[in-house]
Image: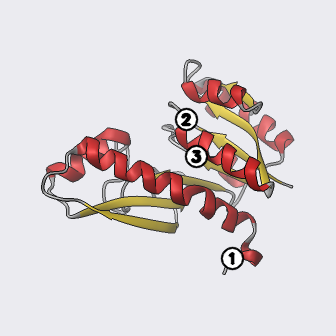
Amino acid sequence: MKRIVIFASGSGTNAENIIKYFKANALAEVTHVFSNRPQAKVLRRAHEHKVKALHFDRNSFYETNEVLNILKDAKPDLIVLAGFLWIFPKKIIDAFPDKVINIHPALLPKYGGKGMFGDHVHHAVINNQEKESGITIHFVNEKYDDGAILFQAKTSISENDNAKDLAKAIHKLEHKHFPTVIEKLLYPEDAQ
């Protein structure tokens, strides 16, 4: 069975969705959830699904090999960033080439980069009167939202939509597509 490790910083609805998806189809399992915030709800969600939940600080992520060594022991087939807000260290990317992906709540290359996450993205999209937005799933490199794009899905924006409306539409796209894109990456031979 393929192994997935998730990194998240917030409430963890995407992480929980991925955990449930793979529990239901038994093609892979989420073995660990990591968070840089000890109070993040994602850790509680992981515990509720009997997934190992770990939090770490900046030092163990960037200055030591503590997180890297745990990842090496976990032997993930894919590392999934689902609302994880720190730049990923080169040493981890190098240790897991083409095995680290991220989801971004906009159509990259627009509305990406440092500070462009969550509601910040949705407000910027609405303020610029865009006609559409969406999600981007991409490989992770050493820059924010810069890796090769794997998948995008779009949603249209009406004149009356606000950032909250857009956030709901984006969330639906994330829940619908993120698990299936992960599955296709893990089992490319089965992808049509």
Q: Residue 16 falls in which quadrant of the image?
A: top right
Q: Position of residue 79 (x, y in %)?
A: 68, 49
Please tell me whether mark 1 sits on a helix, a strand or a loop.
loop
Residue with the most extreme front position:
24
Q: Could you tell whether 105 is left or right of 15 in the image?
A: left
Q: Residue furthest top?
A: 39
Q: Nearer the viewer, mark 3 or mark 2?
A: 2
Residue drawn at 19 percent across, 50 percent down: 161
Q: What's the distance in space between the residues labelled 3 and 1, CA to CA?
A: 22 Å
Residue beneath the point at 43% across and 66% down: 153
Query: Disc 3 and disc 2: Cα gap in Å?
Result: 11 Å
- Name the foreground residue: 72 vs 131: 131
**Along the horizontal axis of the image, is 9 left or right of 100?**
left
- Mark 3 vs 1, N-terminal side: 3
Helix, strand, or loop for circle 3?
Answer: strand
Amino acid type, label 3:
Leu
Amino acid identity at mark 1 = Ala
Residue appearing at x 19%, y 60% in the figure: 130
Q: Which residue is mark 1?
A: 191
Residue at disc 2, secondary structure? loop
> In what quadrant of the picture does the N terminus appear?
bottom right
Q: Sequence-wise, which precedes: disc 3 or disc 2?
A: 2
Q: Return the residue at label 3.
A: 81
User: Where is mark 2, residue-wise?
Assistant: 12
Q: Residue at x 62, y 56 (%)?
A: 179
* Residue 76 image offset from top left, x and y in percent: 78, 49
Ranked by sequence position, the earlier of labels 2 and 1 is 2
Q: Nearer the viewer, residue 31 or 26?
A: 26
Crowd rating for badge 1 (residues with CA inside 10 Å; few <14, some 14–19, many 20+): few
